Image: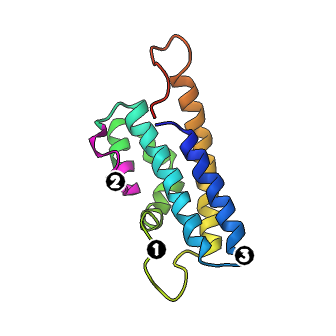
Amino acid sequence: MNIGRIEADIVAAHIALDIARKNPFAADQAAFHVQQAVEKGLKHFLYDVHGADSSELFTLHDIGEILRRLEALEPGFGARHAEIAEAAETLSDWSGEAPETDGPRAAPEDVRRALGIAERFYEEVRVADAERNAPGNGNAGPRL
């Protein structure tokens, strides 16, 4: 997975949060992009770093399940990412289209908090990707 997609989701979340100041429904869009950033980061570790079977790449969206799979491959992963584990249910709820309701489903302050988690995790993903793609380690580069 190209980690540039993670950064794009983080940028999109920031833009949507700015718009949410005038249109609270934009917080739902920000929430979706935050969820996507975290999901893609976790999948980077699952598929690109650990080489797990990627047949579910486009169908697995449950953050808690991805964390469980990573924990099985790398004991301690979940403990090191307790912030994500604690937010997993909320993040997973943000993975799909917002239901038709009278109000937004995501509160901007919750999205901002989750965005901070996503940004911190992205830094870890960037480091892991750079190490994985360093000259001489046998990897051809990031997957698209």
Which callout, 3 or 2, points to the residue nearer the camera? 3
- Going 46% across and 74% down the picture, which residue do you hit? 98
- Name above or below for residue 51 compared with residue 80: above
| Label 2 Cα crowd, 10 Å radius (few <14 / some 14-19 / many 20+) | some
Q: Residue 55 placed where, x, y %?
A: 27, 41
Q: Residue 124 placed where, x, y %?
A: 58, 39
Number of the label disc, if any, that sits on residue 65: 2
Amino acid type of the residue that numbered disc 1 sits on in the rendered structure = Ala
Q: CA distance from mark 3 to mark 2?
A: 33 Å
Q: Secondary structure at mark 1?
A: loop
Q: CA distance from mark 1 to mark 3?
A: 18 Å
Q: Secondary structure at mark 2?
A: helix
Sooner in the amino-acid sequence: mark 3 or mark 2: 3
Dividing the picture into quarters, in which one does residue 106 lie?
bottom right
Coloration mode: rainbow
Nearer-the-camera pick, 74 or 110: 110
- Going 31% across and 38% down the picture, which residue do you hit? 54
Residue 63, magenta (yes or no)? yes
Sooner in the amino-acid sequence: mark 1 or mark 2: 2
Number of the label disc, if any, that sits on residue 78: none
- The answer to whether the residue labelled 1 contacts the one labelled 3, judged by CB atoms less than 8 Å apart, is no
The residue at which mark 1 appears reads as: 98
Number of the label disc, if any, that sits on residue 21: 3
Q: What residue range appears in magenta?
A: 54-66
- Name above or below for residue 56 compared with residue 83: above
Amino acid type of the residue that numbered disc 2 sits on in the rendered structure = Glu
Q: Residue 119 placed where, x, y %?
A: 63, 50
